[in-house]
Image: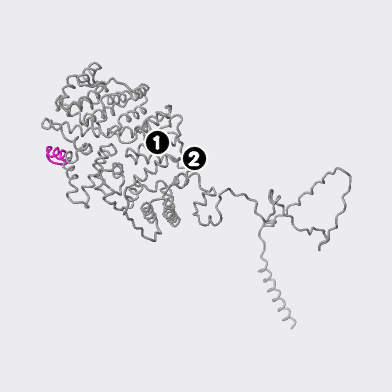
Amino acid sequence: MKRSVLLLAGVALACTSATFALAAPEDLLPPGFGNAPPPPPPPPAPAPTPRSSGATPAPGPATAPNANGATGSSSSPVVQPLPGVGEGLPVSQGSGIALPEGFPTLAELEKMETDEIDQILGLTPKFDIPAGARRSMEKVGVLSSEEGGFHSRSFAGQPAQLVSAALTAAKGQMLSRWGHILLRRVLASRLDAPEGMDPASFAAMRAAALNAMGEETVARALVQDVDGSNYNRELADAAMESYLATGDILGMCPVARLQPLLREDGEWEMMQGLCLAYDGQVRSGERRLQKVLGTQMAPTIDVRLAQRFAGAAGEGRRAVNIEWDGVEDLTAWRFGLARALGVDLPEGLRRPGQQPELDLAEVQIPASPLLDRVQASQQAAARGTLSAAAMVDLYSLLYASDLYDAGAKAPARQLRAAYAAADVAQRIAAMRNLWTSNPGYGSQVLTAYAAARIEPSDAFADDAGELIASMLTAGLDRNAMRWSGVVEDGSLGWALLALAQPADNASVSASAVESFADVSERKARFLLAGLAGLGRLSDDDARNVAQNLGTSLDRTGPWRAKIERAAATGNAGLVALLAAVGMHGDTWAGMTPRQLYTIVRSLDRVGLSAEARMIAAEAVARG
């Protein structure tokens, strides 16, 4: 019995030991690892404050001992007032924070959009580009001098008043296709601003001039070379026009979001709404557009087009009807949005051939109907906006399209015959059909490369003049020179080749120039001016021929003095700009032989002989 009790006690002890072992596992970490850090030492006692007198302060009340026998403070915490708050004014009357005058009330803030609140609180970002990637306002443009542009310092040392006046005078249509191309190169070059002119204003003037020429695509590229934080009102206006004309509606959003107060008109407010919608804030964008409609900041048709465009961003839950009733004119806003949305324009508003600015923009918008683009390409090519290769591309699209009948595709078939007809006579006949169906200069641009494929032959000597003129519209002077052995002296083809030949030492006799007067006396005067400007006619011969033709090349004036002075200093960029001033106009009737002589001579002196030759040849072909 005693032994059983001992055994049970041993078993119980073993179980208890096992339980303790499970409850308290052995610590395998080294000593001191994982222990809480020691408390920081108490701060040193403050030094006694020196006193001016030996008086002993009166003893204060004794502190009561705490439960541990130590004395402690039982006073309430002290709250230190903020400086300037409550001084001379009861605290209950306000917080003491002074708000600026006109600051919105809480009720007004609750009705505002997020971007409006950010704008009031100064939270709108000032930059959208990292500091290391921001671009300087020097050398703003698209083409560097290595890419065919003019020198960046072409206008840097010139007075701002002179450059501004020249840009204003050259704004609009150019009578010369090659003059248009030359001015486009000047305006698109990477240039420093003139002395005393703001770089943003200089970029704005160049972009506005490009827009007026129908070169909105180049203007858009130019304004995109300026960071949004550097825009001013003039540059924003020019940029908005270029974006609308090219159908790039949202291209203005970076500037609109960075500088919402740059403009205060209805179009700018609608642009803010569109940018909000495509930034993911569709509801905020719709409310902004509805606000514009309610306050009548913009016409109803403009807002409806914007609402339709914003609805395409997503989450659009209502259809927007576009009604043109009562609309009498087609603005850039309406045209750009309608084309971007694919909305048909009423026939009374869109009149091809009668709205040049819209015709030039039509070609550049891919969303425009193909047939409208083809029809507008004639004027664009004649102006210089569209190249011969781009024009052929448009006609090729028309030829391959299944959306139009045989009658609409007839010009495309004629162009194909001009390239691919088996017989050379048929190819020339196809070109003549294109020239007669569209008598403008654009048809000759269209057939430039087809004309270059014709082998020179005496059998086609009568067609040589038109073929050479067509080739020179695209600058194919070496192809045209192959006809030099075919053309007769005194013919149109001979006159064009006399001006277009690249040889520097070429010379022409005075008698040959006078014989060309039998073809056209006005063309003969332009031939005289071009040959004299290129130095291919001696001064004495030029003077005698001018007298026989009843004209003069010697008269001077302020414009001639400026361009000749620029040519004497070798400033090609300024010469090109001033030459554009002399070629500004609608028709060649406004060009005089004296002007042409000055332009050709100045361009040739500064190394722009190729442009001078093409302008002179164009004057004879079109004059």
Image: magenta residue range: 419-433
Q: Residue furthest top?
A: 540
Q: Amino acid at mark 1?
A: Met
Visible in this render: residue 258?
Answer: no
Magenta-colored stretch includes residue 270: no
- Give the residue number, with chain letter if any, for mark 2: 132
Find residue 444 and report its image quarter.
Answer: top left
Residue at point 67% right, 63% down?
26
Q: Is residue 131 left or right of residue 620?
A: right
Who is closer to the viewer here, 480 or 67?
Answer: 480
Q: Is residue 622 left or right of residue 316?
A: left
Mark 1 closeness class: few <14, some 14–19, many ≥20 residues within 10 Å: many
Q: Residue furthest left?
A: 459
Sequence-first disc among 2 and 1: 2
Q: Is residue 374 left or right of residue 3?
A: left
Q: Secondary structure at mark 1?
A: helix
Residue at point 79% right, 59% down?
74
Q: Mark 2 and mark 1: span between their CA atoms?
A: 28 Å
573, above or below 24, in the image: above
**x, y percent for residue 373:** 26, 45
**x, y percent for residue 508:** 20, 20
**Label drawn at residue 205:** 1
Quadrant where the N terminus sits is bottom right
